[in-house]
Amino acid sequence: MTEQIASRELAFTRQFSTAEKKILTHDAVEFLTDLVSQFTAPRNQLLQVRLAAQQKIDHGELPDFISETASIRNGDWKILGVPDDLLDRRVEITGPVERKMVINALNANVKVFMADFEDSLAPSWDKVIDGQINLRDAVNGTISYTNESGKIYQLQPNPAVLICRVRGLHLPEKHVQWQGEAIPGGLFDFALYFFHNYRTLLEKGSGPYFYLPKTQSYQEAAWWSDVFSFTEDRFELPRGTIKATVLIETLPAVFQMDEILYHLRDHIVGLNCGRWDYIFSYIKTLKNHPDRVLPDRQSVTMEKPFLSAYSRLLIKTCHRRGAFAMGGMAAFIPSKDTQRNAWVLDRVRADKQLEADNGHDGTWVAHPGLADTVMDVFNRALGERKNQLDVLREEDAPIPAELLLQACEGKRTEEGMRANIRVAVQYIEAWISGNGCVPIYGLMEDAATAEISRTSIWQWIHHGKTLSDGQPVTASLFREMLAQEMRVIQEELGEQRFSSGRFDDAARLMERITTQDELIDFLTLPGYALLA
């Protein structure tokens, strides 16, 4: 039986060990309590608004620009400003908050490290607490790690700028409760990172910087602005001390980018093309629209009209307001095979060249081994400039809602469906085992690609689509393929790895969320129930 430790109105369902005592200090918990009591009810209302908006789309409406906020889109305003150490973000690396990864990411040939409590971290209690300790030690410059063979990892001089990505509004922190309910995971992540690091960051000429994921509306952006302003007032900091970059990785948000920038204008420095989650959101948001069904995920590339329009509109919107427009993730992993590695680097180079040519100010990589290649692309594109805020794309034709919603051409193949099953099952198995960042078939996968994989198949089943060879996609066909692909995974990984893992649990979860009548919003929600 777990012990409950109450602090005013917060209840912790785990006993505090040495690690918790380092992070969940009395003053830190007091601050967290203030945030939770002040902002949980408005957050819960925002989640209800999400459901209501989705129901309208499910019943035939399509997302569109909001007529009531036209004055914001047409107005001549700019964001408050960008701190000096965020003016050059040409290459950013992302990864979970595990100790060795934090050190390697900060030492990589990049400008920024986005330390992730969200899609690349399976948020077990121990990992969340250890992550806060790791980031505090990184900010203080004291972080080090020694592996089993005695190799020591330490910070090099001039590490990358640190940005913390907190969990999205929908994700709870089940180990901390308030009024009998799990508190918002994003508030937990924000409160502890801010509290333990803001002074040291400001003393070093940096600041408390955040990435905000899964935003769906400008009202959600305004909620975060209120959280930031409340925090600045509580700690007697100037308005705009806290800075955020918002991921535009949901379909509803792409129609509200001006409004998101406006409502966060004191705190925001840019928007990011979270393209993998955006593809997932396109499927999920338009799940009831049979004319918007996507093909194999491998063929949904940034050259497709609806994704190209999304990238260009984000750049134009951001630069008009003085905000950065960050590019998307290169998920490839370098290969030890020379020929394969050359192919990987060519693919990455072409993808990043497209982003640089479009006018993005920087981009993401998932592996330090890609940093040099991507840095070279943006060095050539930028020349003497630190960013591309001068690329205003004023000659672009207007981008209407129809283009952002345009159906995507491509085949639905048996090979693609089987690949989706293998990727999703292996990712789910890793996630419920505590690992949210997983190399699978040469790609560094996080939750977004597993989400695309399982929602694609759900949508094909739901709308009775056929594969390119004429096979109807049914629940029974999926179950048959799932059983077959489980044997493939077993052969690929070996009996020892397979039998010692949680593949049966992963397959059961995959089967449930892919065949049930209602599409579940995020696989990480039922997955969280299987996580310690």
Image (cartoon, helix red, strand yellow):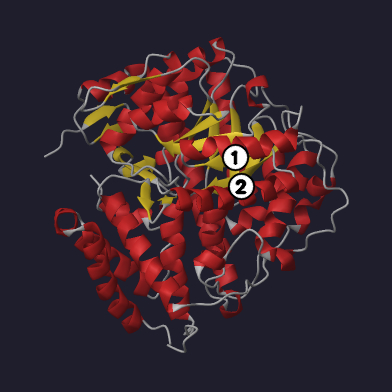
Residue type, numbered disc 1: Val
Viewer-proximal residue among 486 and 20? 486
Which quarter of the rendered picture does the C terminus lie within?
A: top left
Where residue 278 sits, quadrant-wise, is bottom right
Left or right side of 66 for 368: left
Q: For residue 349, which numbered disc appears in the image?
A: 2
Evaluate if marks 1 and 2 touch, with contact meaning CB atoms under 8 Å apart. yes
Which quarter of the rendered picture does the N terminus lie within?
A: top left
Give how far across and how far down residue 51 sits, in percent: 51, 61
Left or right side of 187 for 360: right
Give how far across and how far down residue 327 sits, in percent: 63, 45
Viewer-proximal residue among 382 and 246? 382
Residue type, numbered disc 2: Arg
| Rendered position, 237 above or below 438 | above
Q: Residues within 10 Å of mark 1 (few under 14, many from 20)?
A: many
Give how far across and how far down residue 162 sits, in percent: 51, 26
Q: For residue 237, which numbered disc appears in the image?
A: none
Q: For residue 374, which numbered disc appears in the image?
A: 1
Q: Earlier in the sequence, mark 1 or mark 2?
A: 2
Q: Under tag 2, what secondary structure? A: helix
Give how far across and how far down residue 13 sits, in percent: 22, 36
Q: Residue at x 72, y 28 (%)?
A: 386
